[in-house]
Image (cartoon, rainbow, N blue to C red):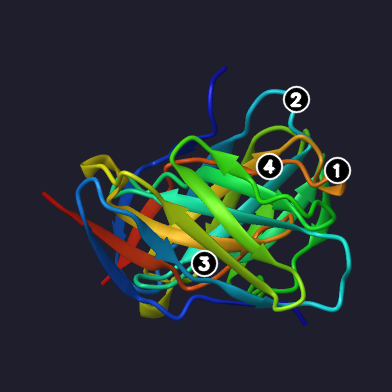
Amino acid sequence: EAGVAQSPRYKIIEKRQSVAFWCNPISGHATLYWYQQILGQGPKLLIQFQNNGVVDDSQLPKDRFSAERLKGVDSTLKIQPAKLEDSAVYLCASSLDWQMNTEAFFGQGTRLTVV
Amino acid sequence: AQTVTQSQPEMSVQEAETVTLSCTYDTSESDYYLFWYKQPPSRQMILVIRQEAYKQQNATENRFSVNFQKAAKSFSLKISDSQLGDAAMYFCAYNVPPLFGSGTQLTVLP
């Protein structure tokens, strides 16, 4: 079974530029999550999708971050404009159905450096 | 609001020895799940073990076991016969979507 795929693995951009991350969850998984992991900290949930609907985006800085999952499969997370404090690893995860408390499977993440 | 606390930023263990990583949490729920995840330098978060709160029996997966104390809201991870490949960041997490603690960096000494 293929795991959660993320790209790119690394990205370096200048502040005020925009960047996008892509995630392909495990086939059949209805729930998709984006996490932000700042160096030395635990991952923090940014947004949670159930199919193509948003379940929770309370921690997403909506003035600069946006995410979509248009067909209920792949997802993109965008930052525009980026700030220095956005430097972090962005992790995507998926699960069969969060309401069943099934395990979340994680991708390898994208390391973003904002200079 | 729920919280997860890991008070040991770093731990070390000699190869083949046993180490215990601590985790406490706070919740008003009676039914929930707890997890331990391992994050090696590759950054991929890997599930080590999970515990369902309504089950009194502590979960075990090969060399990994937990000590779940529901009343004390404590959920520690014991790694027996530590191996070099166990070196990683370990995160305690509450429920789904996972709410993570700050992590414990485990070093395994040869």
Placement of the N terminus of chain A among the 4 image quadrants = top right
| Residues behind callouts 4 and 2 on a single chain | yes
Label 2 environment density (alpha carbons within 10 Å; few <14, some 14–19, many ≥20):
few
Image spot of residue B72 (x, y percent): 70, 79
Which comes sooner in the sequence, label 3 or label 2?
A: 2
Residue under label 4, please give it. Answer: A103
Q: Is residue A7 left or right of residue B88?
A: right
Report the chain holding disc 1.
Answer: A
Task: State the separation of the CA atoms marked 1 and 4.
Answer: 9 Å
Q: Is residue A9 left or right of residue A53?
A: left
| Residues behind callouts 3 and 1 on a single chain | yes
Residue under label 2, please give it. Answer: A28
Numbered disc 3: secondary structure: loop
Residue under label 3, please give it. Answer: A80
Which comes sooner in the sequence, label 4 or label 2?
A: 2
Numbered disc 1: secondary structure: helix
Residue A79 visible to the viewer: no
Q: Is residue B3 left or right of residue B47?
A: right
Count of marks, rendered view: 4
Report the chain holding disc 3.
Answer: A
| Residues behind callouts 3 and 2 on a single chain | yes
* Vertical side of A103 occupied by B33: above or below: below
Q: Is residue A88 left or right of residue A46?
A: left
As shown in the figure, which amino acid type bears the numbered disc 2?
Gly
Residue under label 1, please give it. Answer: A100
